């Protein structure tokens, strides 16, 4: 009988322990999983980064850097609450380790994100204006208040979460400080002589300096070299009207008289101060897909990471091509060789060489990422309503990508080869990055 009672007691104790463990797990689940959170939390931060870039008048290069660190910080804020989530530490160039949550402490990963993300944007955006700072902090306060109200997050969990966010921010910014951005634009550069090289870009004749010619020396995130997927050389220069080179420039010139083509060119122009730059044009689309495709938070975070990293690495590789070939813009050839001395492009000609096209490279990488994630699906884009374009519908990401790279021809700022091969360059790099980055253990 004693043994029987002892057995019953052991069973009861075991049951009680398992029940306590189960309850304990349930109690902690809201703090240790991200499945309960709405994707709008990440969507609002990427939109905030886009708005910050636009309001501060940045060009695409710095914009691509800011968007990437924003997406990475959001993902790393949430990764320990993602099902089988795998950190990007050890996967990205120069990022070996990141702070780990302390065992035994409870965290709210959304609080981590809404505390870390504005700090990353503020620190990576050069000469940020106070209005932008205020907007970022206001969004952080709004999200924190909403999370507290909905999930009854305790003061201790909030403190744990913010302390961890601070550690994460310090580590990411220390890593960012080694990517060779500091004073990059101050490296001395001498424009190559056009003597014997009539195809060279002559920025001085356009009143332009090559904007950050050494951007290609920046550390990429995922590609192992700026020469990965490198396109073939530009067409051989010729002033002969029957040559392929002349015909490519003539296409640009003829497009400048076609209102429908000009409309495509201006739609995708994304000039500084008027949008989030070409680096943000596809992110603007991605932000809208969160609602259009009813994405969950996990998918949204992965989408932002892949798009921003491929955009950033794409601009690095693209800038190597511009530096290597230093190819003239169509405007110079149209004026000096074709004899149309007062011709101007419908879209302002940017201050750097033609080959290859950054907008086209970005269109190739971003469309490839979206096709990988969702298939070649239709979508609508309303990000340019404020500029009078209305909402534009696309039958597929492929169609939008083609539209985007043609826009640089129709806008008068690139020859076809720079756009077509730039587009393929972007697609190749995106596929390399997709294969390289793992999101699950």
Image (cartoon, grey):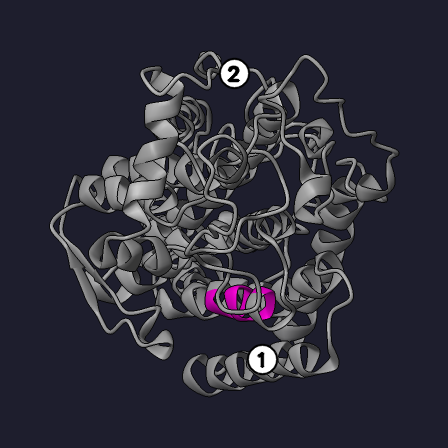
Q: Is residue 34 magenta?
A: no
Q: Quadrant of residue 288?
A: bottom left
Numbered circle sitting on residue 154 = 1
Characterize the local packing of mark 1: few (<14), some (14-19) or many (20 or more) Cα atoms within 10 angstroms.
few
Near-viewer residue (432 or 420): 420
Residue at position x 72%, y 27% from top?
Answer: 217
371 sits left or right of 80 in the view: left
Label 2 to label 1: alpha-carbon separation = 49 Å
Quadrant the C terminus occupies: top left
Tell me, yes or no, whether the two marked residues, 2 and 1, touch with CB atoms within 8 Å. no
Instruction: Tell me if I can see residue 19 in this picture.
Output: no
Q: Earlier in the sequence, mark 2 or mark 1?
A: 1
SS category of the residue bearing label 1: loop
Near-viewer residue (25 or 323): 323
- From the top left corner, tell me how far across and down residue 268 is, in percent: 37, 55
Instruction: Tell me if I can see residue 223 in this picture.
Output: yes
243 sits left or right of 353 in the view: left
154 sits left or right of 173 in the view: left
| Vertical arrangement, residue 421 with respect to residue 108, above or below | above
SS category of the residue bearing label 2: loop
- From the top left corner, tell me how far across and down residue 421 is, in percent: 38, 23
- From the top left corner, tell me how far across and down residue 267 is, in percent: 33, 60
Near-viewer residue (51 or 298): 51
Q: Which segment is the magenta one?
A: 47-53
Residue at position x 46%, y 67% from top?
Answer: 47
246 sits left or right of 176 in the view: left
- From the top left corner, tell me how far across and down residue 95 is, in percent: 68, 33
Residue at position x 85%, y 44% from top?
Answer: 183
Depth-wise, is mark 2 or mark 1 nearer the camera? 2
Numbered circle sitting on residue 257 = none
Near-viewer residue (416 or 357): 416
Query: Which residue corresponds to mark 2?
Result: 228
């Amino acid at each position: 009988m004693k043994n029987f009672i002892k057995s019953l007691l052991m069973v009861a104790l075991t049951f009680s322990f398992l029940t306590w463990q189960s309850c304990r797990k349930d109690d902690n689940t809201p703090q240790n999983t991200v499945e309960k959170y709405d994707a709008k939390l990440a969507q609002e931060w990427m939109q905030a980064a886009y708005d910050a870039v636009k309001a501060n008048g940045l060009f695409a290069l710095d914009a691509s850097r800011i968007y990437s660190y924003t997406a990475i910080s959001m993902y790393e804020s949430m990764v320990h609450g993602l099902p089988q989530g795998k950190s990007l530490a050890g996967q990205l160039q120069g990022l070996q380790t990141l702070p780990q949550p302390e065992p035994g402490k409870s965290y709210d990963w959304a609080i981590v994100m809404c505390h870390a993300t504005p700090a990353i944007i503020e620190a990576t955006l050069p000469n940020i204006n106070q209005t932008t700072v205020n907007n970022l902090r206001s969004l952080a306060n709004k999200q924190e208040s909403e999370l507290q109200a909905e999930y009854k997050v305790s003061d201790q969990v909030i403190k744990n979460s913010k302390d961890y966010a601070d550690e994460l921010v310090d580590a990411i910014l220390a890593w960012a400080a080694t990517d060779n951005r500091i004073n990059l634009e101050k490296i001395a550069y001498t424009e190559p002589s056009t003597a014997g090289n009539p195809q060279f870009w002559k920025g001085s004749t356009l009143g332009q300096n090559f904007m950050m010619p050494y951007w290609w020396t920046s550390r990429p995130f995922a590609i192992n070299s700026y020469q990965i997927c490198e396109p073939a050389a530009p067409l051989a220069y010729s002033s002969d009207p029957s040559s392929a080179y002349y015909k490519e420039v003539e296409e640009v010139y003829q497009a400048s008289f076609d209102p429908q083509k000009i409309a495509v060119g201006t739609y995708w122009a994304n000039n500084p101060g008027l949008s989030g730059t070409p680096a943000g044009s596809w992110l603007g689309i991605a932000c809208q897909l969160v609602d259009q495709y009813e994405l969950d938070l996990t998918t949204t975070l992965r989408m932002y990471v892949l798009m921003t990293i491929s955009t950033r690495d794409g601009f690095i590789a693209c800038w190597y091509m511009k530096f290597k070939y230093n190819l003239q813009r169509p405007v110079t050839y149209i004026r000096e060789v074709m004899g149309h001395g007062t011709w101007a492009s419908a879209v302002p000609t940017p201050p750097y060489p033609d080959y290859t096209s950054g907008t086209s490279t970005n269109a190739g990488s971003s469309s490839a990422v979206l096709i990988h994630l969702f298939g070649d699906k239709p979508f609508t884009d309303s990000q340019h309503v404020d500029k009078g374009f209305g909402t534009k519908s696309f039958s597929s990401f492929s169609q939008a990508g083609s539209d985007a790279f043609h826009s640089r021809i129709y806008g008068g700022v690139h020859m076809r080869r720079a756009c077509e091969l730039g587009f393929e360059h972007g697609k190749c790099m995106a596929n390399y990055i997709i294969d390289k980055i793992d999101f699950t253990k």
